[in-house]
Amino acid sequence: MTAHRLLTPRWLATGGAVLLAGVLGVALLLRDGGPACAAPPSASAQKGKATFYDLSGGTGNCNFAPPADDLYVALGRTQYTGATACGSYLDVTGPKGTVRVKVFDSCPECAVGHLDLSRTAFKKIANESAGVVPITYRAVPNAPTPGPLSITFAEGSSQYWWAILIDNHANPIVSVQAKGPGRGWMTAAHATYNFWIIDKNTGNGPFSIRITDSYGHVATATGVKLLPQRRQSTSVRLTGKAVSAPVVAKGPGAAKKKAAPAPSKSKASSPPAAPSASATPSVPEPPAAGADREADGLTQAPPVALAAAPAAPSCG
């Protein structure tokens, strides 16, 4: 009999002002940053065990739409690291072979080294009937992504408070900064549900958004518009070079501008692992896979519904 972990509800969908108020409360709790005493998996091979679960619709705590290949993983609190691990990739090797998975979700009951894979991913490394198998796994620095960086403002974002979801970054993000016309750089706080929040008057934009990953790579997207619930695709990839490029306009007659490469400033080693615990994140509803549409010269996605707030993370 398959011994996979039953998926427990990791989010509560509600509506209207109650939802937004809950997330605003979390934003205030988290604006000074998330947990600082844990780290995502490193690039060194580690031993552990794997199980699998079914998403059963909905989304993971990282708020990404499920990958097109259905290859993803949920990590325990210590390695989820308050959402720092979200969007990074792991190579997982089991009895039948190796699979690459995207960090997509948290598994509050999973200990360090316990990886909860999608059923599709598990079947690539082991027989489904095994249920639990020994594995080795490691982080994959600079893993290829399906496209360049994308940025989505959460529902309720305005010049006075905004939150963004960043996807296709490959490596863990450690810093997000933004500035609008005539303003200096403002630093965003990372919420456990993987949105980057600025809780002050940011202006109406358009914004330059500067993203730094755990290996010291820097990318800046310019011309990002304050358009809640629309996924904006950029021409920037967060790899080994510091680059600055405008958001790509995909509407009729829109001209694409090429990224202007700049010298890389530094490269850092993978962050060391350390024990921690983080609260189970709440989950805004992400754009539905395959439901994108084009309008106003930007790639859009369906509404991002914010979910009920979790408790503030703690390290013990």
Image (spheres, grey):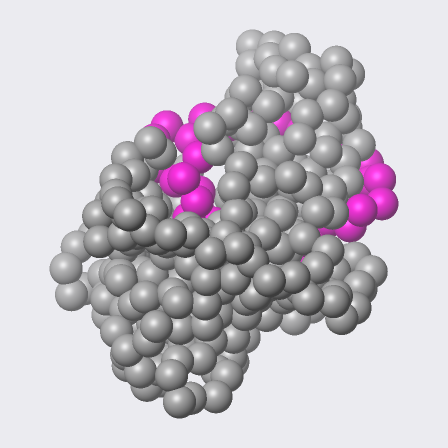
Q: Quadrant of residue 247?
A: bottom left
Indicate the quadrant containing the N terminus: top left, top right, bottom left or bottom right.
top right
**How many marks overall?**
0
Residue 282 visible in the current orientation: no
- Residue range in magenta is 39-66
- In percent of width and height, residue 166 lies at 47, 56
Residue 13 horizontal side relative to residue 222, left or right: left
Q: Main secondary structure of the magenta part?
A: loop
* Left or right: where 290 falls relative to 117: left
Residue 94 visible, this angle? yes
Observer-nearest of 116 and 154: 154
Relative image position of residue 177 (x, y in whole percent): 52, 75
Quadrant showing the C terminus: bottom right
Going 79% across and 57% down the picture, which residue do you hit?
Answer: 270
Residue 211 placement, left or right of 252: right
Q: Residue at x 82, y 60 (%)?
A: 269
Judge by depth and name the residue closer to the eye, 281 or 2.
Answer: 281
Q: Position of residue 227 (x, y in %)?
A: 27, 62
Along the horizontal axis of the image, is 177 left or right of 291?
Answer: right
Report x, y in % for residue 5: 53, 29
Residue 55 is covered by the magenta coloring? yes
Q: Residue at (51%, 25%) from the top-left corner?
A: 69
Check residue 298 for magenta coloring.
no
